[in-house]
Image: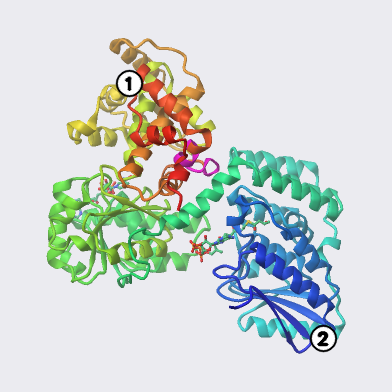
Amino acid sequence: MTELVSYRLAGKIGVVTIDNPPVNAFSHAVRKGLLRRILDAGQDDAAAAILIVCAGRTFVAGADISEFDKPPEDPWLPEVLDAVEGCPKPVVTAVHGTALGGGFELVLASHYRCALNSARIGLPEVHLGLLPGAGGTQRTPRLAGAEAALELMTTGKPIGAGKALSLGLIDRVFDDELEQHALAWCEELIDNGSGPLRVSERSVPALDAAFFDGAREQLARRARGQLAPQKIVDCIEAATQMPFTEGAEFERQRFAECLGSPQSAAMRHLFFAEREAAKLKDVPKDTEARELRSVGVIGAGTMGGGIAMSCANAGIPVKLLDVDDAALERGLGVIDTNYAISVKKGRLAEDEAKRRRERIVSTTDYADLADVDLVIEAVFEDPELKKRIFAKLDSVCKAGAILATNTSYQDVDEIAAATGRPGDCLGLHFFSPANVMKLLEVVRGAKTADDVLTTAIRFAKAIRKVPVVARVCYGFIGNRMFNPYIRESQQLLLEGATPEAVDGAFYEFGMAMGPIAVSDLAGLDIGYKARMALPEDLRGSDVPFTVADRLVEQGRLGQKSGAGFYNYDPKTRRATPEPAVTAMIEEASRELGIERRSIDAAEIVERPLFALVNEGLKILEEGIAQRPGDVDIVYLYGYGFPAYRGGPLFYADSIGLDKVLSRIREFDERFGSGKPAPLLEALVAEGSSIAERFAR
Ligand code: 3HC
Ligand code: NAI
């Protein structure tokens, strides 16, 4: 078995290699191994300098996140890195792949730093509700200044080696042969008699307190509700005010506070849930994906255009089909505008935008789809139309081509049955705008073949989406849960809440947008039509939607018509309340005989949110979702659920299922909000959490 941290001599250079696949995370064993190797190398008379490198695909990707839930074990990472920095011989680190979190902190603790041109470095701890806890908040500003350090740590975005070089975070960059170049540099250091250059011994230029106050204010808006970004500012400020050891101690305490916070637990859950969601429980791991080199998209509307862009952005050529030239021109016009905006905003170089755009060709002829590997249908939400299109695809597409529908609600099995190859069919449910939103629900039909699913997941990753697998039901995971959530939020209006109060309470809870504002965004007519198309058993009472339906009758369709529940500024799209809508809501309550009352923010949030959780549990019980984490990922990436609450099911566990159950029962008795899911009752009866029941 290879050692996790090995040591060898290359001439006068002691080479320490970390080899802990897949990403060389700093597990306890690696920390222990590195400490021992560094101390030994420091004592090795044959070594005049030390080089630290990593085996495999990447440099160290940080602390081992799976160990954060376990009791801490010595040596801690800061201790190991202090030993690296304290080494009496020059220590060089050489980065390939990514050096992230604790991995980059190792780089900062070394005396000389080099990287491959293609390498990236970053401090992404903030995405885990943490801050760099092994000296990163103290050493980064000493090399790159407080401003750059703040940007790196509060965005969590990795930067390329070139940028790191210009910021002074890396000293040398090489195009290839990293280890050879790094060894040559070590020789140079030895020949020049260069000793250790310790970052902790450098000073940080003082900065005005106003800079840090400004950063706190900005982050209170940009990272609303989150603890870690505020503590990162505190630590960087400490770096400008305190000697290194004091600053490092300050950092350690703040790190411990973050690590013990519910926010970090929630975000760590999402880290692993995202990776797990891409795994199919009952499909053999070695299932080979089909070749996927080209895509056809049917329908150049809102979704089809975004889907085509997602593929083109990832280098996949697209054939975009619509009924006639006028429809295609309209669709391509929107695509052109989107690319032009990206170029104008400096997010995309003009030549790259051109290359991407050129990957999309248009057609009105199905024969042009004969040789594509995957077709994604995104025409109107009309099941009969979709079936006709699938029958047509069956007759023109080559054998082995995958046929997908982007339907929001329709039965994927029925659509697949319109073809003679249901095994090749599935749902690929994108979210709007499809070129921006990261979620992709992969809807698995009863007959979808294993290799089709494997290909779909690989495709999702290739176009930089987060795939979550769902079985067939009305609305799959996301939209099915959303319906009772919206229903309850509408009902609250009739009982006494205003649209601003409902949206305000959810905004405070951390949602990107409240449910009433979301209804306006999606279009009140869309919700209306979808409800009307539902079979009786799924439709439920129309009463909660009394106001929404009246708004549709008045042509107030939401943002797209400039007015819905709110009025929208045509330029800024800023929402303002409309007194006539308030009067309409009050009148509807009167007509329905509902006595309006004052409803506090806690109840406003609990009613729709617990309805969401309840439906999520039904979905789990029916096997529509594979695991609770999948439901959480759908809500994180598809519906703007705050990451620091971990998704609806994690959140339900965190506040206690007994509380959720008793409130759902109470709401049902008082307002007829719906019965608790049998799974919820069973979990409370047996005293277990959702996570415990569905543990891996
Ligand atoms: N700890 C434990 N496991 C990790 C890990 C980590 N830091 N990083 C990745 N993994 C695991 C993943 O869970 C996955 O496991 P699986 O195969 O069982 O699902 C496997 O490694 C491969 O990961 P990805 O699927 O994400 O592989 P990619 O090639 O797509 O991405 C990566 C590689 C860019 C390194 C990405 O994994 C990543 O961003 N990792 C997390 C980096 C991070 O957040 N580091 C900071 C940790 S906190 C810290 O360092 C605290 C310190 O300041 C004290
Ligand atoms: P849209 O109305 O913007 O676009 C539909 C396009 O399909 C139009 O360009 C139309 O000309 C074209 N079309 C109609 N009949 C056709 C035919 N026979 N052959 C070829 N093209 C045809 O609709 P949108 O919003 O893009 O929705 C498309 C699908 O995506 C629907 O099934 C919808 O439920 C689903 N969806 C929509 C989301 C949204 O937020 N808009 C989100 C997720 C899924």
Percent coordinates x, y for residue 228 in the rendering: 65, 45
Query: Residue 56: which disc?
Result: none
Q: Give the vertical position of 431 relative to 198 (above or below).
A: above
Which part of the image, by quadrant, shows the N terminus? bottom right
Instruction: Name the side, left or right, on which 317 lies relative to 176.
Output: left
Label 1, ligand 2: CB separation under 8 Å: no
Instruction: Evaluate if marks 2 and 1 touch, with contact meaning CB atoms under 8 Å apart.
Output: no
Q: Amino acid at mark 1?
A: Gly
Left or right, 147 with reference to 530: right
Q: Which residues are magenta?
A: 643-652
As helix, strand or loop, the secondary structure at mark 2 comes to loop
Residue assigned mark 1 = 672
Q: Nearer the viewer, residue 79 or 110?
A: 79
Which residue is identified by label 2? Answer: 46
Instruction: State which quadrant residue 157 falls in.
Output: bottom right
Foreground residue, 80 or 191?
A: 80
Identity, as a three-letter code, of the amino acid under mark 2: Ala
Tell me residue 305's x, y (percent): 32, 55
Q: Between marks 2 and 1, how big is the CA–CA gap?
A: 79 Å
